[in-house]
Amino acid sequence: MSARGIRAGGILAAGEGSRLRADGWAVAKPLVPVDGVPLVEHAIENLLAAGIERLAVIFNAGEEDCARFVETRFPAADIRVLVKTTASSYESFREIAAILPPGPALVSTVDAWCPRPDFVRFAEAAAALPGEATVLAVTPFVSDEKPLWVRLDGSGHVTEIGGGAGDFVTAGIYLFPERARTLPAPPTIGRLREYLAWLVERGDPVRGVAIDAVVDVDRASDVALAARLSAGRLEGTR
């Protein structure tokens, strides 16, 4: 059963993965394995474990191997795969949002490696919040080269996104209500992080739910770090 009625989910996997290629990985980023499991498979399994029934995944043009992998690995799942190069993470988000059914949607970037129990707990906690709120998974564990800092007030509302410091960093996992998914944004918005900051600046309800650790897998060293998190050997986490 889905977390409090959240039945739709999406995965943003259209990035170039240039830093992983520079570190020697020959496969497309969504197929880079952590503990033998490709990133995209882990992300799909997380969403399915949270009760998501309809999924959409977007890959870069030229990554038909990723599309074939998903179709072969999950033949019984309701997954729509797009293969399309986008200019930004925000454009990828819009492509996904346009094909998902009405209602809230749980969205993850493909490189946000999160332990499954923590992912499901986030989905459940986010679903329990007021339905008009956009909910960000946030973490005190900083593994991103360019972290997106957030500040929260005492009730968990996000008061600021961006800057050089904050209470937490975003984890690449989100719950978007239908209204936020369809809200027209200014043409100057280029990246998803800019869209999130715009939501906060315009006074939209944006909440944060903390999870222990998420590894943003951009480098070969991040693959090893995620494997340590998978094995429970990451200091400072459960």
Image (cartoon, rainbow, N blue to C red):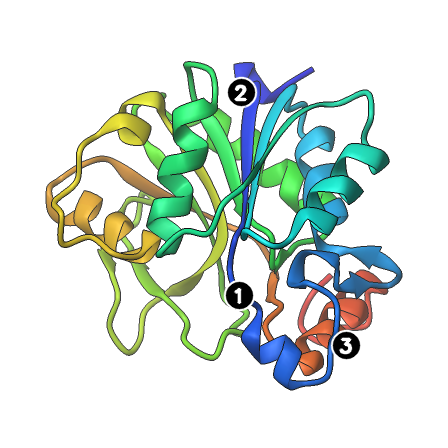
The residue under label 1 is 16
The residue under label 3 is 224
- Disc 2 versus disc 1: distance between alpha carbons? 29 Å
Q: What element carries label 1?
A: loop
Q: Where is residue 42 in the image (x, y as percent from the top left)?
A: 75, 48
Q: How packed is label 3: few (under 14 Cα within 10 Å), some, or many (20 or more)?
A: some
Relative to 36, 140 lies left or right: left
Relative to 143, 44 lies left or right: right
Residue at 66% in and 37% down: 120
User: In the image, which disc is placed on residue 215?
Assistant: none
Residue depth check, mark 2 versus mark 1: number of the one nearer the observer: 1
Determine the image quadrant of residue 23.
bottom right
Give amino acid for label 1: Glu
Residue 64 appearing in the image: yes
The residue under label 2 is 6
Q: Is mark 2 on a helix, strand or loop?
A: loop
Residue 159 appearing in the image: no
Q: Where is residue 198 in the image (x, y as percent from the top left)?
A: 18, 49
**Residue reaching furthest to the bottom:** 23
Give amino acid for label 2: Ile
Labelled pair 3, 2 in contact (Cβ < 8 Å): no
Residue at 75% in and 66% down: 229
Q: In this view, does 204 lie above or below 179?
A: below
- Disc 3 versus disc 1: distance between alpha carbons? 20 Å
* Mark found first going from the N terminus, 3 or 1: 1
Q: Is mark 3 on a helix, strand or loop?
A: helix
- Disc 3 versus disc 2: distance between alpha carbons? 32 Å
Give amino acid for label 3: Ala
Labelled pair 2, 1 in contact (Cβ < 8 Å): no
Q: In which quarter of the image is the N terminus?
A: top right
